[in-house]
Image (cartoon, rainbow, N blue to C red):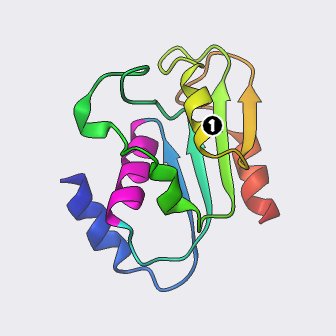
Amino acid sequence: MWKKLFTKEFKKIGQSVILVGHSLGGSMLLKYLSEERPNISISALFLVSTPFWGKDGWDVEDFVLQENFEATLKHINNVYLYHCKSDKIVPFQHLNFYKKAFPHSIVRILNGTEHAFSKGLPELVSDIKKL
């Protein structure tokens, strides 16, 4: 169902976009972008508290990324990763997978236990404004 939604919405895009994925949404976004390869221009990708799925992460087959998935995303020059040190939902160690996959990413390690960022994420807003 989420693939159909992404496909429908991405077809509407006619200019370069900034994509933000949070938690499971970040996982689904990465899977879609790397497997379906939509014909869109992405100026930046922001991933917030994104879980890693697979053998050393959360073991749910539907969300596991293909091996070497990052090779299909090399056209995205600006990748930002955000994760709280003591995230109560997605363990901080999950960030290590994405840091390795995107070695040139900008990594924002945040203090606290926040996952939903109910009071906002000013670091994300600041980074978007700098683009």
Q: Which quarter shows the C terminus? A: bottom right
The residue sitting at 60% across, 22% down in the picture is: 114
Judge from the rendering whether residue 55 lies leftward or rightward of residue 117; answer left or right.
left
For residue 120, say whether it is visible. no
Q: Picture coordinates of residue 4 (x, y %)?
A: 21, 63
Residue identifier under label 1: 100
Q: In the structure shown, which secondary structural element does the residue marked by tag 1 occupy?
A: helix
Q: Picture coordinates of residue 1 (x, y %)?
A: 17, 53
Judge from the rendering whether residue 67 lies leftward or rightward of residue 100; answer left or right.
left
Count the marks: 1
The residue sitting at 50% across, 35% down in the picture is: 50
Judge from the rendering whether residue 116 lies leftward or rightward of residue 78; answer left or right.
left
Q: Is residue 68 above or below residue 41?
A: above
For residue 16, say whether it is visible. yes
Query: Alpha-carbon neighbours of circle 1 within 10 Å: few (<14), some, or many (≥20)?
Result: few
Residue furthest left as drawn = 1
- Judge by depth and name the residue closer to the eye, 10 or 77: 77
Q: Picture coordinates of residue 77 (x, y %)?
A: 68, 64
Task: Give the main secondary structure of the magenta stretch.
Answer: helix
Q: Is residue 18 above or below residue 90?
A: below
Residue furthest bottom as drawn = 14
Q: Picture coordinates of residue 92 (x, y %)?
A: 60, 19
Judge from the rendering whether residue 127 lies leftward or rightward of residue 20; answer left or right.
right
- What's drawn in magenta, residue-wise? 24-36
Q: Please name the amino acid that badge 1 sits on.
A: Lys
**Residue 10 magenta:** no
Report which quarter residue 85 is drawn in.
Answer: top right
The residue sitting at 34% across, 58% down in the picture is: 35
Q: Is residue 33 above or below residue 64?
A: below
- Judge by depth and name the residue closer to the eye, 120 or 107: 107
Q: Is residue 14 above or below residue 33?
A: below
